[in-house]
Protein backbone atom coordinates (compact mmCIF):
# COMPACT_ATOMS: atom_id res chain seq x y z
CA UNK A 1 0.00 0.00 0.00
CA UNK A 2 1.45 3.37 -0.99
CA UNK A 3 1.74 6.26 1.45
CA UNK A 4 -1.06 8.14 -0.35
CA UNK A 5 -3.35 5.09 -0.24
CA UNK A 6 -2.57 4.62 3.44
CA UNK A 7 -3.30 8.32 4.06
CA UNK A 8 -6.73 7.93 2.44
CA UNK A 9 -7.53 4.51 3.98
CA UNK A 10 -9.46 5.32 7.17
CA UNK A 11 -9.04 1.76 8.51
CA UNK A 12 -5.24 2.12 8.80
CA UNK A 13 -5.24 5.50 10.51
CA UNK A 14 -5.15 6.26 14.19
CA UNK A 15 -8.01 8.24 15.73
CA UNK A 16 -7.83 11.95 14.87
CA UNK A 17 -5.76 13.90 17.34
CA UNK A 18 -4.81 17.47 17.98
CA UNK A 19 -1.41 18.49 19.33
CA UNK A 20 0.17 21.51 20.93
CA UNK A 21 3.51 22.17 22.57
CA UNK A 22 4.57 24.27 25.54
CA UNK A 23 8.21 25.26 25.85
CA UNK A 24 9.57 26.93 28.94
CA UNK A 25 12.67 29.03 28.52
CA UNK A 26 14.29 30.86 31.44
CA UNK A 27 12.70 34.17 30.37
CA UNK A 28 9.45 33.17 28.60
CA UNK A 29 7.07 30.45 27.39
CA UNK A 30 6.44 29.47 23.80
CA UNK A 31 3.11 27.80 23.08
CA UNK A 32 2.20 26.57 19.62
CA UNK A 33 -0.18 24.27 17.79
CA UNK A 34 0.69 21.48 15.39
CA UNK A 35 -0.78 20.36 12.07
CA UNK A 36 -1.28 16.60 12.42
CA UNK A 37 -1.43 14.20 9.46
CA UNK A 38 0.22 10.95 10.48
CA UNK A 39 3.08 13.10 11.71
CA UNK A 40 2.94 16.51 13.33
CA UNK A 41 4.60 19.69 12.19
CA UNK A 42 4.43 23.35 13.12
CA UNK A 43 1.19 24.70 11.71
CA UNK A 44 1.80 27.88 9.71
CA UNK A 45 -1.87 28.81 10.20
CA UNK A 46 -2.02 27.81 13.86
CA UNK A 47 -1.25 29.48 17.16
CA UNK A 48 2.38 30.35 17.99
CA UNK A 49 2.74 32.67 20.98
CA UNK A 50 5.64 33.86 23.10
CA UNK A 51 4.43 34.70 26.59
CA UNK A 52 5.88 36.14 29.77
CA UNK A 53 7.02 33.68 32.42
CA UNK A 54 4.84 35.51 34.93
CA UNK A 55 1.69 33.74 33.67
CA UNK A 56 -0.46 32.12 36.32
CA UNK A 57 -1.15 28.38 36.10
CA UNK A 58 -4.71 29.17 34.99
CA UNK A 59 -3.48 31.48 32.21
CA UNK A 60 -0.94 28.90 31.02
CA UNK A 61 -3.68 26.25 30.98
CA UNK A 62 -5.96 28.61 29.03
CA UNK A 63 -3.35 29.31 26.33
CA UNK A 64 -2.54 25.59 26.12
CA UNK A 65 -6.24 24.89 25.54
CA UNK A 66 -6.30 27.61 22.90
CA UNK A 67 -3.35 25.97 21.14
CA UNK A 68 -5.03 22.55 21.25
CA UNK A 69 -8.19 24.02 19.74
CA UNK A 70 -6.10 25.76 17.04
CA UNK A 71 -4.38 22.49 16.12
CA UNK A 72 -5.60 20.86 12.94
CA UNK A 73 -5.98 17.20 12.08
CA UNK A 74 -5.56 17.20 8.33
CA UNK A 75 -7.43 14.64 6.30
CA UNK A 76 -7.09 16.29 2.92
CA UNK A 77 -3.85 15.63 1.03
CA UNK A 78 -4.06 19.13 -0.50
CA UNK A 79 -4.04 20.68 3.01
CA UNK A 80 -1.01 18.55 3.88
CA UNK A 81 0.76 19.72 0.72
CA UNK A 82 0.03 23.38 1.58
CA UNK A 83 1.43 22.94 5.11
CA UNK A 84 4.57 21.27 3.80
CA UNK A 85 5.05 24.00 1.18
CA UNK A 86 4.67 26.72 3.83
CA UNK A 87 7.36 25.01 5.90
CA UNK A 88 9.84 25.36 3.05
CA UNK A 89 9.98 29.08 3.87
CA UNK A 90 11.40 27.99 7.26
CA UNK A 91 9.15 29.95 9.64
CA UNK A 92 10.71 28.03 12.53
CA UNK A 93 14.12 29.57 11.84
CA UNK A 94 12.64 33.08 11.94
CA UNK A 95 10.92 32.28 15.24
CA UNK A 96 14.16 30.87 16.69
CA UNK A 97 16.01 34.06 15.76
CA UNK A 98 13.29 36.10 17.43
CA UNK A 99 13.48 33.94 20.58
CA UNK A 100 17.30 34.17 20.70
CA UNK A 101 17.04 37.94 20.56
CA UNK A 102 14.38 38.02 23.27
CA UNK A 103 16.43 35.70 25.52
CA UNK A 104 19.68 37.56 24.87
CA UNK A 105 21.23 34.33 23.55
CA UNK A 106 23.79 34.28 20.76
CA UNK A 107 23.35 30.62 19.86
CA UNK A 108 20.73 27.86 19.75
CA UNK A 109 22.62 26.13 22.55
CA UNK A 110 22.39 29.27 24.67
CA UNK A 111 18.68 29.67 23.91
CA UNK A 112 17.79 26.13 24.91
CA UNK A 113 20.00 26.00 28.02
CA UNK A 114 17.64 25.44 30.96
CA UNK A 115 14.59 24.97 28.73
CA UNK A 116 11.78 22.44 28.98
CA UNK A 117 9.17 20.99 26.62
CA UNK A 118 5.81 19.29 27.03
CA UNK A 119 3.50 18.15 24.24
CA UNK A 120 -0.25 18.03 24.72
CA UNK A 121 -2.19 15.41 22.77
CA UNK A 122 -5.99 15.57 22.57
CA UNK A 123 -7.54 12.32 21.34
CA UNK A 124 -11.04 10.95 21.92
CA UNK A 125 -11.90 13.29 24.83
CA UNK A 126 -8.56 12.66 26.60
CA UNK A 127 -5.68 15.12 26.97
CA UNK A 128 -2.27 13.58 27.58
CA UNK A 129 0.86 15.46 28.64
CA UNK A 130 4.18 14.19 27.29
CA UNK A 131 7.29 15.80 28.79
CA UNK A 132 10.47 15.64 26.72
CA UNK A 133 14.08 15.26 27.76
CA UNK A 134 16.41 17.83 26.20
CA UNK A 135 19.14 16.23 24.09
CA UNK A 136 20.81 19.47 23.03
CA UNK A 137 20.10 22.26 20.58
CA UNK A 138 16.61 21.83 19.17
CA UNK A 139 16.55 18.05 19.81
CA UNK A 140 14.17 16.45 22.30
CA UNK A 141 13.21 12.87 23.16
CA UNK A 142 10.34 11.33 25.07
CA UNK A 143 11.20 9.80 28.41
CA UNK A 144 11.40 6.01 28.28
CA UNK A 145 9.09 3.96 30.54
CA UNK A 146 7.17 7.00 31.61
CA UNK A 147 3.63 7.24 32.88
CA UNK A 148 2.03 10.25 31.28
CA UNK A 149 -0.55 12.45 32.94
CA UNK A 150 -3.98 12.13 31.36
CA UNK A 151 -7.06 14.27 31.85
CA UNK A 152 -10.62 14.27 30.61
CA UNK A 153 -11.22 17.09 28.14
CA UNK A 154 -13.35 18.69 30.85
CA UNK A 155 -10.22 19.50 32.90
CA UNK A 156 -10.12 23.04 34.22
CA UNK A 157 -7.62 25.53 32.82
CA UNK A 158 -6.04 25.87 36.25
CA UNK A 159 -5.60 22.11 36.78
CA UNK A 160 -4.14 21.76 33.28
CA UNK A 161 -1.78 24.68 33.91
CA UNK A 162 -0.60 23.23 37.25
CA UNK A 163 0.10 19.88 35.58
CA UNK A 164 1.95 21.62 32.73
CA UNK A 165 4.18 23.50 35.16
CA UNK A 166 4.92 20.23 36.98
CA UNK A 167 5.75 18.37 33.75
CA UNK A 168 7.89 21.26 32.53
CA UNK A 169 9.97 20.81 35.69
CA UNK A 170 10.29 17.09 34.91
CA UNK A 171 11.49 18.03 31.42
CA UNK A 172 13.92 20.67 32.73
CA UNK A 173 15.43 18.33 35.32
CA UNK A 174 15.87 15.57 32.75
CA UNK A 175 14.54 12.82 34.98
CA UNK A 176 11.22 11.11 35.27
CA UNK A 177 10.31 9.11 38.33
CA UNK A 178 6.67 8.52 37.39
CA UNK A 179 3.76 9.34 39.67
Image (cartoon, rainbow, N blue to C red):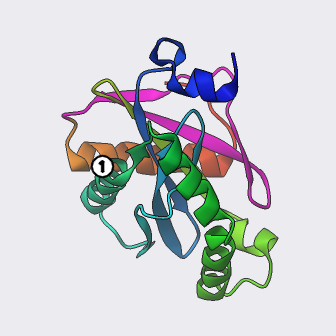
Q: Main secondary structure of the magenta part?
A: strand
The verdict on residue 95 being magenta is: no
Q: Nearer the viewer, residue 61 or 20?
A: 20
Q: Where 168 falls versus 149 (above or below)?
A: below
Q: Does residue 42 appear in the picture of this structure?
A: no
Query: Residue 118 at x, y = what percent?
Result: 53, 46
Residue 87's place in the image compared with 142, above or below, is: below
Q: Residue at x 56, y 27 (%)?
A: 7
Report the residue at 45% width, 41% height from top: 74
Which residue is tagged 1? 69
Query: Does 61 sit left or right of 24 as displayed?
Result: left
Q: Is residue 55 left or right of residue 99?
A: left
For residue 35, side relative to residue 156 (left or right): right
Total marks placed: 1
Few, some or many residues within 10 Å of mark 1 (<14, 14–19, 20+): some
Residue 88, image quadrant: bottom right
Span colored in magenta: 127-154
Is residue 153 magenta-colored? yes
Residue extending furthest toward the top: 11
Residue 51: name its quadrant: bottom left
User: The N terminus lies in which quarter of the figure?
Assistant: top right
Q: Nearer the viewer, residue 57 or 16?
A: 16
Amino acid sequence: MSCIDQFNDQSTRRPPERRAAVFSFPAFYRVHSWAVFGMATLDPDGLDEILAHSLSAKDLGAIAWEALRASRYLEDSNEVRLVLEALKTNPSKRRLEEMKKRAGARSIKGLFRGSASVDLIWTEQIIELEPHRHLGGERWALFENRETIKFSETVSEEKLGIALISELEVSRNGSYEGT
